Amino acid sequence: MFDVLRRAVDLAMSLGATFADARAKNIKTEHISVENDRVDVSTDESLGWNIRVIVDGAWGFAATHDFSKIDEAVRRAVALAKYASSAMKYRVKLVPAPVVKGEWISSYEKDPFEVSLPEKIDLLKEAVSRMKGDALVRRYGSLSFRLEETWLVSSEGAQIYQKFIESGGGISAMAVNPQTGDVQTRSYPNSFGGQYMKKGWELIEELRLPAHAEDIAKEAMELLNAPELPEGRADIIIEPFQMALQIHETCGHPTELDRVLGEEASFAGTSFLTPDKLGTFRYGSPVVTIVADPTVPHALGGFGYDDEGVPAHRTYLVREGIFVGYLSSRETAAMLGLSSSGGAMRAEGWWNIPIVRMTSVNLLPGSGTLDELLSKLGDGYLLSTTRNWSIADDRSNFHFGVEVAYEVKNGKLTGNIFKKASYGGKTVEFWNSAEAFTGEEDYVVVGVPNCGKGEPMQTMRVSHGAPYGLFRGVKVGG
């Protein structure tokens, strides 16, 4: 494979490119779901390659599944770059990057593609069968697996091979009150497909989906008769899976440097974290430190090298409450005058050009346990599991709905629950209301398999390390 990509790069350079890189990707996926009594299985496998060039200070890109059309693809990329150059307001520059020859393979214990399909289906059927109740209208479970291999060659001398194994799974129960039309859902371990990591079948075994099925079904039905969360200001604790969404939407996206520089304005929006704020702006309270770190073991957003060949490394985005960094590429770093790339260039498939994406954007833990945080909370609510979300295009304010709110009195869970719970506010005010986070014991690296960005759309797999967090005086409601 490297020989083929090297030929493409060499040809591009001979045609006038000042930079070229070529990458091939082999992607294999499997998705199994059980909805009530219906089983669905889908599989896919795709192999292809692409070439990215700089000619006359502009990018050109071409991709194909046909490895016999090297000459055609390279010439198309070079021609596109020449056309683009005539309309460019600036010339592409890249910050330096280490020239790497190496490989990185994610660690796993059991290849999920070697587990039989009947075993996977039986596990989901067992979980779904344990959800019992007349009010239940949808009992659902799913498993997803992905194998990805990437080969990268650049005109600077990079030669990199990477292989990832990713697994995910979750269950949900939906209950309906036919008299009122009220619909309530509870999910485990998270909504929107559950938990995802760079692990093998062992992740599915660790999740123990059937063991949690009865509890979520029961709670979904209990929510039908629960009151709505009262509107007002309250002290709240947010659990790690919901905290992951908070990090994703209000720190991850607004620190994407291409977005900051206006490249996403027509589709996904802009960012309130403008360059003039870098290094001085108080984003959150002193307990808030957020990093982009794809070196975290088993993180869904982890890797050894990004799709430009930049080695994975930790980048501080917020340090002790101060906004200090961006998710960046070699090009966007140069545009802002930074000395190096944040290593955040990623492409969904061989048919996509790499763009700036989240990696594993993690809120660093504090200390102590959930029980200690509940005690510190006193009176308030514990909010759990994403239900819906709405956010300003510059990410300066937000409103998030959760599946359930648990009442806390005198530092203890009372057993009372509330439905249609939500919270929201201005991003900076919210993060400045942070008082404390739990420690490593309750820390979860949450996988997000469906982050959308780009035109055309690319769906990327990212992750967020998240503790439980205590926030004071947050606007809440039903």
Image (cartoon, rainbow, N blue to C red):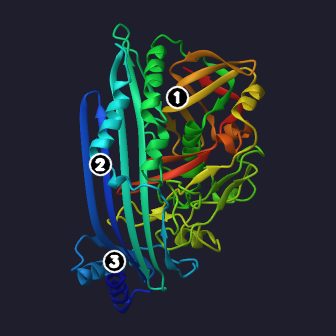
Q: Which of disc 1 and disc 2 is earlier in sequence?
A: 2
Q: Secondary structure at mark 3?
A: helix
Q: Which of disc 2 and disc 3 is earlier in sequence?
A: 3
Q: Which residue is mark 3?
A: 83
Is 439 on the left or on the right of 477, as rendered?
right
Q: Which residue is mark 2?
A: 116
Q: Which of disc 3 and disc 1 is earlier in sequence?
A: 3
Depth check, mark 3 against mark 2: the one in front is 2
| Residue 221 percent across, percent down from the top left | 44, 16
Please count the marks in the image.
3
Q: Which residue is mark 1?
A: 402
> How many other residues sit within 10 Å of disc 1, few (<14), some (14-19) or many (≥20)?
many
Point out which mark residue 269 bears. Answer: none
> How many other residues sit within 10 Å of disc 3, few (<14), some (14-19) or many (≥20)?
some
Q: Using the image, determine if residue 393 lies above or below residue 47.
A: above
The residue under label 3 is which amino acid type? Tyr
